[in-house]
Amino acid sequence: MLRIGLICLCALSALYLIVRYSIPAGLSETGPEAALSLNASYPGAVVGLAQQAISDEANRRAVQKDSPASSTAPADLDALKKALRAAILKDPLNASAFQLLAQIAQLEGNAKSARQMMTTAARLSIEDATANAFMLQQSLLANNVGEALRYADILMRGKTSLIGPVAQLVARMTEVPGAKQELVRRLGAAPPWRAQVLGAFASSGLTNPQAPLGVLLALKDTPNPPREKELVGYINYLLQNKLYAFAYSSWLQFLPKDRLSQVAYLFNGSFEQQMSGVPFDWMIGSGSEVIAGVYARPDNGDKRALFISFGQMRGVFPTIRQMTVLRPGAYRFTGNINGEMLARRGLQWRVTCVEGGLAGESQMLLGRFPKWASFQFDIVIPEDKCAAQYVELVHMARSPSEQLATGSVWFDDLAILRRATGSKATP
């Protein structure tokens, strides 16, 4: 009987704990009122109700600012503070309760108390995004870059949805005087969010295009120097601001010595190097019913070349291009072609100014090329409105019916050479 009695007592105790704590815990977010009916002082339920009340009060004040005649009753902030402090006495490690007290302090205009409460919340819970975001803001206002980066690291590691906006904020920190050393220390450790920060320059609202370059150059001397793909965001940012020459020179500063020695008017014209994704290298998009890529040559497996293959249906030709920064003057484009293309209209290499205008184009490449055959055309870069250029391969189809093509072709050994003539006539 004693054993049965003990079992019953344990069962009743377990049931009490479930009703008193487990059920309120499950209801504290979805139904805090129901949770409080089971346990009038359960901290999680108190926090849930307070959170809703504070949110409603903030919305009420925002509405009242636009419509002063609003008659919605204000929240009893003193009662909320009392309830939250009681919840903290029962659960001293409840970071949400401290965070809500900070929000109340903000509503009351008490910045000092808000900062103290948010500091406590951030220390108690690494997952409290609101508290850590507040501390990030306070650290920036105090010009404490080290602390700001610490909170940025916490936010980007803990909440995926915050990586984008926080990465933009860190990217803008490259403009903060004295922030370079801390930025290099953090980014040099290769945190999981580094690529997002280095890719955020174009969307972060930077006002000084040169600011990130100092940080990027300093990263070259760390155990984790910037990879070429990580430079794309900064290079694209410079190009968006039409700083073509600066973008080109910045890119060159990160090329390895063996690749830097191979830089010419047209980069990687033999397609032997892996494409980096930087606009000054080859950019090959995807098309429809058309395969485009760089592969080993069928006649020489040790060499690579650009390969284009057309399907049996009408296809959309992919983007194949590279940006160059040629100075005004006369040039000649040379290359080799192999394979066959059967269609109404063929392929064409052309050089156009980024600002608009044609600088040179090849003849239409169409038909059979059973052996490697060379082709060339002249380029003239004008003095004005041609600071940068696109070298691109296009299908000269003028209508959907002319997009139908069959066969496959290879291109290799592409180059741009300076011509001796000083002619500046428009081609």
Image (tube, rainbow, N blue to C red):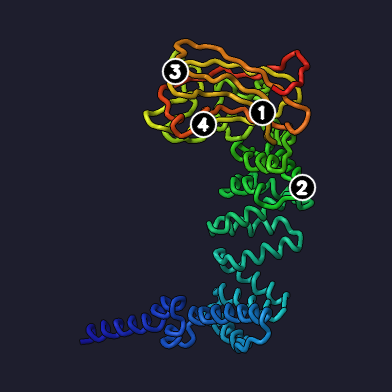
Label pair 3/2, CB-CB below 8 angstroms: no
Q: Amino acid at mark 2?
A: Asn
Measured as percent of width and height from the top left, residue 187 is found at 64, 46
Question: In terms of secondary structure, where does tag 4 sit?
Answer: loop
- Label 3 crowding class (10 Å Cα cut-off): few <14, some 14-19, many 20+? some
Disc 1/disc 3 C-alpha distance (Å): 27 Å
Q: Earlier in the sequence, mark 4 or mark 1?
A: 1
Image quadrant occupied by the C terminus? top right
Quarter of the view holding residue 254 = top right
Residue at x-position 72% and y-position 40%: 242
- Which residue position is annotated with label 1? 358
Q: Nearer the viewer, mark 3 or mark 2?
A: 3
Which label sits in the foreground, 3 or 4?
4
**Mark 3 secondary-structure assignment:** strand
**Measured from the top left, where is residue 117 in percent x and y?**
65, 74
Relative to residue 370, is residue 282 drawn left or right?
right
Seen at 46% across and 16% down, the residue is 367
Q: Amino acid at mark 3?
A: Glu
Ranked by sequence position, the earlier of labels 3 and 2 is 2
Q: Which mark is residue 398?
A: 4
User: Of label 4 and label 2, which has the lower sequence position?
Assistant: 2
- Spatial CA span between label 1 and label 2: 32 Å
How far across and down, in percent of the image, does residue 165 sit?
A: 61, 57
Q: Alpha carbon of mark 3 to alpha carbon of mark 4: how far? A: 20 Å
Closer to the chain start, of discs 1 and 3, is 3
Q: Return the residue at label 3.
A: 340
**Marks 1 and 3 in Cβ contact (< 8 Å):** no
Vertical placement of 98 versus 359: above or below? Answer: below
Identified at 48% across, 28% down, the residue is: 293
Residue at x 55% of width, y 55% of height = 157
Looking at the image, is mark 1 or mark 3 nearer the viewer? 1
Residue at disc 1, secondary structure: strand
